[in-house]
Image: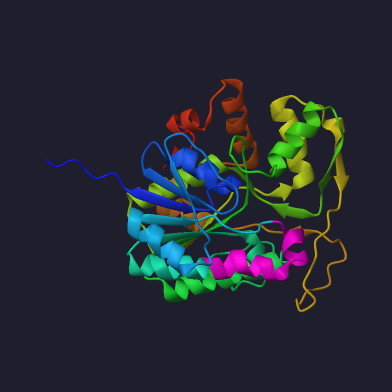
């Protein structure tokens, strides 16, 4: 009996939080290749190479050299404020770069995985489904909606994951993510102001890694799935819950309203409260993949367990009971 070949996963944007975290999570089961642009990356057991996603020649060279079975696009500008301040850069990273990579993936028969978010919606609906037409009100959401549309219309082998807010630590990324900012402030016993008006799901990024692994093992293709915690809340409520699970003083978490720049061209309803709900229905993903995604509290309990027992990303990947199977 011939031994099954280990699949190769190419991650564009391995210097990002999402890219480096997924690489660390998936490297036990797959051969991982990562690309970076200006920030060289070194991850044990992973080959990393420089690449400009806007250069078709560079992308083709990497695809030809490594011949990946799966390609994950983790390049992008994910700050809503930064996208509004630099619309051209947001479009270049979140859409144009993806177009180049997706086109080359077609040629080399590599499945493209694109990571979108709940911000392709306006936040004015009580619940959003996969088949709902995106109605973004921010530049960030607009670029992601355009990328989703392009992938689904032009690719013959793709997966699109609309994900809630992802958190974690231990990546090689340069900028601190929200989770790390909260930890740093609380460790220094400093007050931190967290937004109480934008409500989303929150997931430890390991859960996304596990979902991707399930999809690869089952040969899933040409689907858009929404991946989120089973409930949703504001960042302020997330911070309070974090304090409970990590035994930190809740008094250091202050309620605030963060800037949320809406495009001048966006059509928005009369929302006097200012509260926006980015609640994604995940029934389809749970049913199709035969799993139950956690609540925010359960996700934080998993994160706290990793910290308490001193697990790094590799050891966390080896845990077999983080998702409850049906």
Report if residue 189 lies within the magenta region.
Answer: no
In the rendered structure, which segment of residues is drawn in magenta?
Answer: 79-97
Left or right side of 192 for 96:
left
The quarter of the picture where residue 159 lies is: bottom left
Residue at the left extreme?
1
Quadrant of the frame with the N terminus: top left
Which of these two is toward me, 130 or 12? 12
The coloring applied to the image is: rainbow
Where is residue 274 drawn, in percent x and y? 84, 61
How many labels sit on residues?
Answer: 0
Magenta stretch, overall SS: helix
Where is residue 52 drawn, in percent x and y? 53, 61
Quadrant of the frame with the C terminus: top left
Reply above or below: 321 against 155: above
Residue lying at 69% horizontally and 62% vertically, measured from the top left:
126
Where is residue 257 drawn, in percent x and y? 86, 53
Where is residue 91 drawn, in percent x and y? 64, 69
Residue lying at 62% horizontally and 43% vertically, measured from the top left:
173
The quarter of the picture where residue 179 lies is: top right
Left or right side of 324 for 188:
right
Which of these two is toward me, 263 or 89? 89
Reply above or below: 149 against 209: below
Reply above or below: 2 against 268: above
Report if residue 91 lies within the magenta region.
Answer: yes
Residue lying at 47% horizontally and 28% vertically, measured from the top left:
315
């Amino acid at each position: 009996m011939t031994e099954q070949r280990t699949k190769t996963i190419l991650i564009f944007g391995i210097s990002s939080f999402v890219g480096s975290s997924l690489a660390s999570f998936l490297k036990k089961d797959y051969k991982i290749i990562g690309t970076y642009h200006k920030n060289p990356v070194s991850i044990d057991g992973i080959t990393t190479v420089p690449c400009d996603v806007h250069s078709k020649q560079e992308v083709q060279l990497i695809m030809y050299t490594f011949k990946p079975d799966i390609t994950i696009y983790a390049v992008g500008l994910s700050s809503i404020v930064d996208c509004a301040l630099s619309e051209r850069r947001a479009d270049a990273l979140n859409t144009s770069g993806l177009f180049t990579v997706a086109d080359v993936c077609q040629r080399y028969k590599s499945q493209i995985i694109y990571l979108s978010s709940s911000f392709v919606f306006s936040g004015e609906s009580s619940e959003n489904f996969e088949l709902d037409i995106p109605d973004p009100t921010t530049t960030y959401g607009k670029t992601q909606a355009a990328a989703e549309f392009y992938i689904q219309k032009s690719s013959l082998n793709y997966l699109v994951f609309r994900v809630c807010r992802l958190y974690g630590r231990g990546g090689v990324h340069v900028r601190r993510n929200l989770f790390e900012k909260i930890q740093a402030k609380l460790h220094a016993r400093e007050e931190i102001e967290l937004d109480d008006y934008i409500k989303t799901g929150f997931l430890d990024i390991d859960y996304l890694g596990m979902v991707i692994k399930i999809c690869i093992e089952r040969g899933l293709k040409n689907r858009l799935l929404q991946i989120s915690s089973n409930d949703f809340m504001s960042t302020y409520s997330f911070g309070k819950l974090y304090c409970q699970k990590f035994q930190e003083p809740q008094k250091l978490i202050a309620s605030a309203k963060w800037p949320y720049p809406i495009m001048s061209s966006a059509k928005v309803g009369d929302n006097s409260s200012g509260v926006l709900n980015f609640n994604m229905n995940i029934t389809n993903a749970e049913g199709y993949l035969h799993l139950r995604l956690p609540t925010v509290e359960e996700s934080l309990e998993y994160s706290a367990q990793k910290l308490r027992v001193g697990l790094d990303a590799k050891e966390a990947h080896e845990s077999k009971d983080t998702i409850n199977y049906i």
